[in-house]
Image: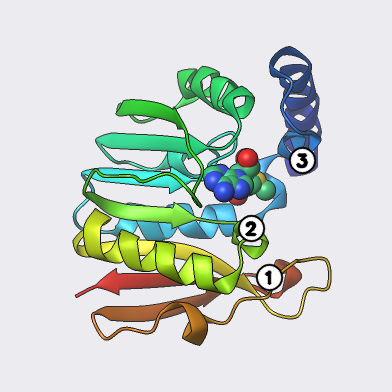
Amino acid sequence: MTSLVVVFKKIARTCLMCIYRFEKWHTSPAENRDYVKNIIEILNKKKSRNSVVEIGCGLGDIIRKVDYKKKYYLDLSPNVLEAAKFLTIFSKFRSEDSFCVFDFVTDSFLHPVDAVVLVNWIHNIDPDTLKNRIDVIVNDVLNESGFLIFDIVDENRNYQFNHKISDLLVREDLVIREYECNKFDRRIVVAEKK
Ligand SMILES: C[S@@+](CC[C@H](N)C(=O)[O-])C[C@H]1O[C@@H](n2cnc3c(N)ncnc32)[C@H](O)[C@@H]1O
């Protein structure tokens, strides 16, 4: 039954790709990526759930399914954002949604939020840039007790950079938790601002 649903979703997303002209990667349904479910659970268990931003949100498979009042969908690709906007029709939660073309490396996000998600693309960002941008997020964007969530994959030869938590989070105002995912030795890191 589950695999039938996945096949159906793959076909629906392929049709969506023909309309919105986003990259083929996004046709893979969320059920193929177990980190999606893990991160949704972590975000929905958080006590203060007013606002969340996902940078590099793609079709919004994570942010669309979390119960927050204000959601910021940010991505480099205007096409995938248009499709993400369309998919909010199917969201089970009511929220105030913003969609913005955004480059993590060069653009600044200035709204304080309770959670920031960066997942399945930070392996393309060099460690120095990533650390600097993370510092800005923790200093200027995350509310007290806010969550910064990102992923780490060890020794993946297909990835440009294999980051280490100790290179990225060199500060004492964060409580760090790690969650194992089954596939591809991916770990989810949750850094909570004290
Ligand atoms: C592999 S997809 C992952 C989408 C989503 N995070 C997920 O896991 O379902 C990576 C997304 O990150 C976006 N992206 C890559 N580099 C980015 C950057 N520098 N700033 C913002 N978005 C970026 C891409 O356009 C793409 O939509």
Task: Reply above or below: 50 against 159.
Answer: above
Cα–Cα span, label 2 and label 1: 7 Å
Report the quarter where the C terminus lies.
bottom left
Given this view, does label 3 or label 1 mark the residue nearer the observer?
A: 3
User: In this figure, which residue is indicated by the disc labeled 2?
Assistant: 34
Type of amino acid at the residue the image marks with label 1? Asn
Q: Position of residue 106 (x, y in %)?
A: 47, 48
Q: Is residue 99 left or right of residue 120?
A: left
Secondary element at image label 3: helix
Tell me which label, 2 or 1, sits earlier in the chain.
2
User: In this figure, which residue is indicated by the disc labeled 3?
Assistant: 25
Q: Can you tell which quarter of the image residue 171 is in?
A: bottom left
Cα–Cα span, label 3 and label 1: 20 Å
At x 51%, y 75%, the residue is 179
User: In this figure, which residue is indicated by the disc labeled 1?
Assistant: 182
Tell me which label, 3 or 2, sits earlier in the chain.
3
Q: Nearer the viewer, residue 152 or 65?
A: 152
Q: Is residue 76 in view?
A: yes
Mark 2: few/some/many CA within 10 Å (<14, 14-19, 20+)? few
